């Protein structure tokens, strides 16, 4: 099976390509590095020749509201059009738990726009909604830091290891399309502030983390469980403590 992975050289994409290749599939990493630009459409037609499945795990280089919306709408429109021409049978896209619960977040609005384009297309699809990755705790802290203080919402998160996300994406890519959504998350839920604080302490970072209900996350205020997967979600087994030790 030929599976093209858009964003195939990134954190998730590279692991997906590796896993699929190990299982005997023709997994192709497509990114600007390989001459594929989804925003302009350059290289898409060539890379999708003979493709059975397309996996899109790409992300916007800018999280500014207008830029991120432009990225996901242009890229997804181009990908879906190229898939239709190439008779691709399954479109798999990685998205975020809580996209439809945080309309004040420009990033989440952009992901909703992406998902709506996928649902409206003629291509059979599967959307994978993942929670925050363990790997992102440092970036979350950096974006919330003023001086030596990190202010973050105590709202619940249920983060997951990127490797576990990649394993699910690779598995879903070779399964029949769901024409629906699969939610995935880690095994434990705790406050966003606690998540980052534990990560910083484990790395010897002396910044203090302050719980602040008014601290925005991607431009939105959190009120409790917007970022936690719902009933029926698929939960991984890797704990944050185990990931930090590894």
Image (tube, rainbow, N blue to C red):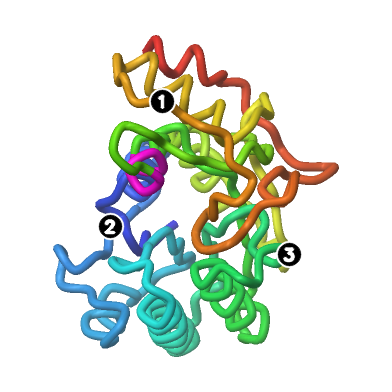
How packed mark 2 is, by other alpha carbons closer than 10 Å (few <14, some 14-19, many 20 or more), is many
Which residue position is annotated with label 2? 29
Residue 2 in sight from this viewpoint: no
Judge left or right: residue 7 versus residue 171: left
Residue 59 lies, in percent from the top left, at 37, 63
Estimate the spatial distance between the alpha carbons at disc 2 and disc 1, rounded to whole Å: 40 Å
Task: Determine whether 25 is above or below 50 in the image.
Answer: above
Task: Determine whether 24 is above or below 71 in the image.
Answer: above
Which residue position is annotated with label 3? 180
Residue at 55% across, 59% down: 95
In the picture as drawn, the residue positioned furthest to the right comes out as: 231
Task: Determine whether 93 is above or below 17 in the image.
Answer: below
Residue 141 belongs to magenta span: yes
Residues rendered magenta in the picture: 139-144
| Magenta segment, prevailing SS (helix, strand or loop) | helix
Q: Nearer the viewer, mark 1 or mark 3?
A: 1
Residue 62 in sight from this viewpoint: yes
In primary-sequence order, the first of circles 2 and 1 is 2
Q: Secondary structure at mark 3?
A: strand
Residue 75 belongs to magenta span: no
Residue at 62% across, 21% down: 237
Front residue (pair 193, 39): 193
Front residue (pair 116, 168): 116
Residue at 40% across, 45% down: 144
The image quadrant where one finds the N terminus is bottom left
How packed mark 1 is, by other alpha carbons closer than 10 Å (few <14, some 14-19, many 20 or more), is some
- Image quadrant in which you'd find residue 64: bottom left
In primary-sequence order, the first of circles 3 and 2 is 2
Which residue position is annotated with label 1? 208
Front residue (pair 178, 137): 137
């Amino acid at each position: 099976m030929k599976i093209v992975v858009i964003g195939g050289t990134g954190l998730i994409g590279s692991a997906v390509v590796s896993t699929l290749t190990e299982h005997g599939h023709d997994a192709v990493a497509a990114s600007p590095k390989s001459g594929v630009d989804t925003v302009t459409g350059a290289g898409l037609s060539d890379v999708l020749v003979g493709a059975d499945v397309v996996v899109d795990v790409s992300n916007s280089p800018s999280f500014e509201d207008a830029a991120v919306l432009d990225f996901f709408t242009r890229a997804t429109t181009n990908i879906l059009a190229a898939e239709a021409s190439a008779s691709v049978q399954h479109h798999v896209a990685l998205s975020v738990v809580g996209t439809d619960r945080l309309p004040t977040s420009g990033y989440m609005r952009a992901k909703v726009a992406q998902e709506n384009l996928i649902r409206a297309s003629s291509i059979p699809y599967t959307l994978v909604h993942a929670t925050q990755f363990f790997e992102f705790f440092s970036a979350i802290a950096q974006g919330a830091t003023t001086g030596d203080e990190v202010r973050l919402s105590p709202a619940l998160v249920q983060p997951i290891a990127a490797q576990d996300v990649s394993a699910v994406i690779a598995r879903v890519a070779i399964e029949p399309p769901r024409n629906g959504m699969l939610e995935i998350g880690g095994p434990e839920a705790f406050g966003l502030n606690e998540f980052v604080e534990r990560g910083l302490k484990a790395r010897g970072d002396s910044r203090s983390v302050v719980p602040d209900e008014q601290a925005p996350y991607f431009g939105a205020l959190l009120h409790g469980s917007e970022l936690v997967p719902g009933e029926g979600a698929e939960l991984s087994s890797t704990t944050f403590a185990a990931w930090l030790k590894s």
